Image (cartoon, helix red, strand yellow):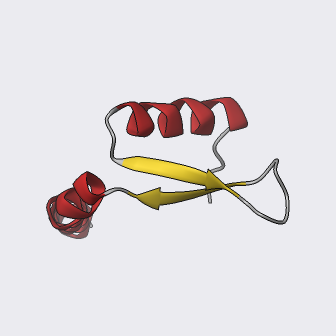
């Protein structure tokens, strides 16, 4: 499994937050911890994103299964 650096993850979370797709609340137990969640806009986008990932995965499998 490929790992993602903290700086890349932070920049991606900030980008999603700037588009109001996600937001966060601080943890009540640990103020350093942020709990991220989908906003209404993020929930509305979920079916589209899911389909895009599903179709890309299917295409990826088709490319490599026919190459063998």
User: Quick check: 55 left or right of 13?
Assistant: left
- Percent position of residue 34, x then y: 68, 52
Q: Tell me which corner region of the image, top left, top right, bottom left or bottom right, holds residue 38.
A: bottom left
Determine the residue positioned at 59% across, 39% down.
9
Tally of numbered tags: 0
Q: Which of 22 and 50 is in front in this view?
A: 22
Q: Nearer the viewer, residue 39 or 4?
A: 39
Identify the image quadrant of the C terminus: bottom left
- Percent position of residue 65, x then y: 23, 70
Q: Tell me which corner region of the image, top left, top right, bottom left or bottom right, holds residue 15.
A: top left
- Percent position of residue 41, x then y: 23, 53
Determine the residue positioned at 40% across, 39% down.
16
Q: Residue furthest front?
A: 28
- Percent position of residue 39, x then y: 34, 56
* 10 to 42, vertically: above or below: above
* 31 to 68, vertically: above or below: above
Determine the residue positioned at 51% across, 40% down.
13
* 64 to 26, vertically: above or below: below
Identify the image quadrant of the N terminus: bottom right
Residue 29 visible (yes or no): yes
Residue 49 visible (yes or no): no
Determine the residue positioned at 77% across, 63% down.
28
User: Quick check: 19 left or right of 55?
Assistant: right
Q: Nearer the viewer, residue 40 or 60?
A: 40
Q: Nearer the viewer, residue 26 or 54?
A: 26
User: Quick check: 39 left or right of 27?
Assistant: left
């Amino acid at each position: 499994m490929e790992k993602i650096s903290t700086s890349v993850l932070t920049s991606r979370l900030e980008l999603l937050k700037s588009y109001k797709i996600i937001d966060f609340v601080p943890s009540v137990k640990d103020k350093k911890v942020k709990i991220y969640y989908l906003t209404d806009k993020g929930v509305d986008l979920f079916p589209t994103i899911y389909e895009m990932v599903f179709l890309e995965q299917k295409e990826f499998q088709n490319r490599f299964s026919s190459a063998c």
